[in-house]
Amino acid sequence: MNSLTVGQKAAKAQLIAMAAQQQFEKKSFNQITMAEIAKQAGVSKGTLFNYYESKESLFMTLLLDGYCAYFESIITKVVQAKTFELADFINLLLGETAELITTHATLVRLNALRGPILEQGADLEQTVTHRKALYETNERLAQTICQRVISLSVSEVSQLYLVQSAIISGLMNLSALDEFQQQPLVEQDFDHFKINLKKDAVATFSYYLAGRYPTIQLSEEL
């Protein structure tokens, strides 16, 4: 590992992360082993542990880097928007809530695991490094939005993204009350425990935003 350049190390770390994500798209966190990830990435298990000392560290990094990339994509949307006022931003938040759930399901699932599982075994130093990178990206996103919508502050924009994340993660944790270990509890009728994650997350966030910005007309397309 020490003979590799910085660029080569980054490329190998990315290769491992991609293999982990592909595994996570098909299996639950508990079903995935580091040996399977190493095999799919084409590296030895020893090499894998040189980059990530635990499965939790690997998936924590996947989560934080994934959100960095996601926030970068929103920055691009804001910069490219011909007009971008407060109403545009509020409706962007709602649209991106639906987009997160439908297009970035891996991030949503990982974020729900962050507190109860990933932080229990993730390396502190590695987590802090990637969390700092995420914070910096989040700050740039907030600053980009505030440059277009001068009535907003950086702290306010950042808080709105935290609220969005909390709503999605909270509903995600409650969305499988009619299942146990990802298997439906078919012998018991839990119909009223069912949650439509996309619909309910967008609706809940809509109520929050309508209360916070009562003069803004929310989009009815979501």
Image (tube, grey):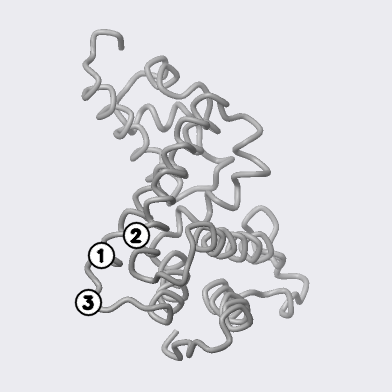
Picture quarter containing residue 117?
A: top right
What is the C-alpha distance between the residues marked 1 and 2? 7 Å
Please tell me whether mark 1 sits on a helix, a strand or a loop.
helix
What is the C-alpha distance between the residues marked 3 and 1? 8 Å
Q: Nearer the viewer, residue 72 or 111?
A: 72
Which amino acid is tagged 2?
Thr
Residue 170 coordinates in the image, percent (x, y) = 66, 62
Q: Nearer the viewer, residue 16 or 28?
A: 16
Residue 55 coordinates in the image, percent (x, y) = 52, 31
Q: Is residue 64 above or below residue 92?
A: above
- Proximity of marks 1 and 2: CB atoms separated by less than 8 Å: yes
* Badge 3: residue crowd in 10 Å (few <14, some 14–19, many ≥20): few
- Proximity of marks 3 and 1: CB atoms separated by less than 8 Å: no
Q: Nearer the viewer, residue 135 or 51?
A: 135
141 with respect to 128 (left or right) = left
Residue 79: image tag: 1
What is the C-alpha distance between the residues marked 3 and 2? 14 Å
Please give the residue where the numbered disc 3 appears in the rendered image.
82
Q: Is residue 97 above or below residue 41?
A: below
Report the residue at 42% width, 82% height from top: 87
Q: Is residue 121 above or below residue 92?
A: above
Please give the residue where the numbered disc 2 appears in the rendered image.
144
Please tell me whether mark 3 sits on a helix, a strand or a loop.
loop
Report the residue at 41% width, 74% height from top: 89
Which amino acid is tagged 3?
Lys
Which amino acid is tagged 1?
Val
Residue 118 coordinates in the image, percent (x, y) = 60, 38
Report the residue at 64% width, 74% height from top: 195
